[in-house]
Amino acid sequence: YTMATSSHRSEDGGRTFTEIAVRPTYDVGVHADQHALWIDPNDPAHLYMGGDAGLHESYDYGTTWRKINNFAVSQFYAIGIDVAEPYRVYGGLQDNHSFVGPSETRRWAGIVNDDWQQVGFGDGMFWAGNPFDPDIAYGTSNGGNYFRLHARTGDMVDISPEPPPGEEYRFDWTSPLIASRHDAHTVYAAGNRLFISRDRGSSWARSPDLTRQIDRDTLEIMGVTGAATTISRNDGTSSFGEAVALAESPVDPSVVWIGFDDGNLQVTRDGGRTFSEVSANVDGIADGTYVSRVVPSTRGAGVAYAAFDAHRDGDFAPYLFRTEDFGDTWQQLHEGLPSGSILSMVEHPDNADVLFVGTEHHLFVSTDAGASWARMPNLPTTAYDDLIVHPREKDLVIGT
């Protein structure tokens, strides 16, 4: 058996192959991208297959399959919430579109699969409900595809920023998006530039290129540059030099932070007219380290947290810092956090001393503004990709 985007079986030692798990369409049949196979040692016709759509089982050597769909194996890139009652939770799923479901129901069994609806296509990414309108939400899919959703009707409108003729924008695989908590019509998106819309995404203003503008053909993986690979150029790398973290100050709408995969950490204090790059002021991390999260604080306009993820360089230590002066100086907060790259973070809206940090293994909480940390009990060992505290109910919503 060979596993790949599609899978095949040979019965003559590899001289000929026949495809198994044939999929009629993208979402019907066994999903593409099949990664793992278990063959029953007591019955070779009995197979388990794991892939981008979860777990499938066959009893006829892979001719037919059933999906085992009664346990949670989805991977959330990012999640969002709205202000409906009960509020909805939106989530972007790896290679399985985006979905929305209620935070609670009147069913005696609680929330069931039928309560969740697909919204969006492709690999789902960031989501943001409009804090002033429960019917409006904004979503993204891989590579910078942005859309506005009417949650009640299901209508979707493409709002992706379009470059002028002769120009190109760069967007990360997980390109960020936020809805302003200060204005019902303001939306932010980010690629190699910051994009600001004042009309719910119908038009966009743009910043200059805020990245280091590194040619990824010059980047090396195991001593080989992207330009030197002849079979598949830049194989193993996504596009490079784009925003991956984006946040608006909860106390001053003119303060917006943008973090990049090339290590840049930019802040604007005047609504996007000018920018300051402040990653050079952070001591204790290697230059160019991926900015995994930036979280402005309710303590003041100049207060924010920044997390950095160095696992791409073989460094799995957590890196978390706080600034109180718009990034001019930074204080380390990661002492007491065990090894594990930081993927997500949130500050409690009612108590700035309460911080939650999600790593690639566990969820941690601090009740003293990051001076000490404790692991949250009764949660599995998994990657904590996104965290949100609902502004009304104060629920902690976790995407894993």
Image: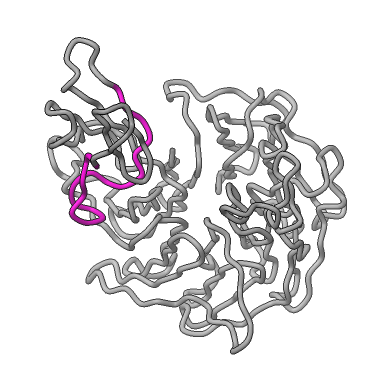
Query: Is 333 left or right of 358, judged from the image as shown?
Result: right
Query: Residue at the top extreme?
Result: 42
Residue 33 lies in magenta, yes or no?
A: yes
Q: Which is nearer the eye, 123 or 348? A: 123
Above or below, comparing residue 72 to residue 139 in the picture: above
Residue under the point 71% across and 58% down: 216
Q: Which is nearer the eye, 11 or 343? A: 11
Q: Quadrant of the C terminus?
A: top left
Q: Position of residue 109 (x, y in %)?
A: 15, 35
Above or below, comparing residue 3 to residue 262 in the picture: above
Query: Is 262 left or right of 138, judged from the image as shown?
Result: right
Please provide the residue range marked out in magenta.
Answer: 19-38
Residue under the point 54% across and 60% down: 175
Above or below, comparing residue 146 to residue 381 in the picture: below
Above or below, comparing residue 188 to residue 163 in the picture: above
Residue 207 lies in magenta, yes or no?
A: no
Find residue 269 and report its image quarter: bottom right
Residue under the point 35% across and 34% down: 2
Residue under the point 73% across and 54% down: 262
Q: Quadrant of the N terminus?
A: top left
Prevailing SS of the magenta stretch: loop
Query: Residue at the bottom extreme?
Result: 165
Display colour scheme: one colour
Query: Is 305 left or right of 148, judged from the image as shown?
Result: right
Q: Position of residue 25 (x, y in %)?
A: 21, 56
Q: Which is nearer the eye, 186 or 47? A: 47
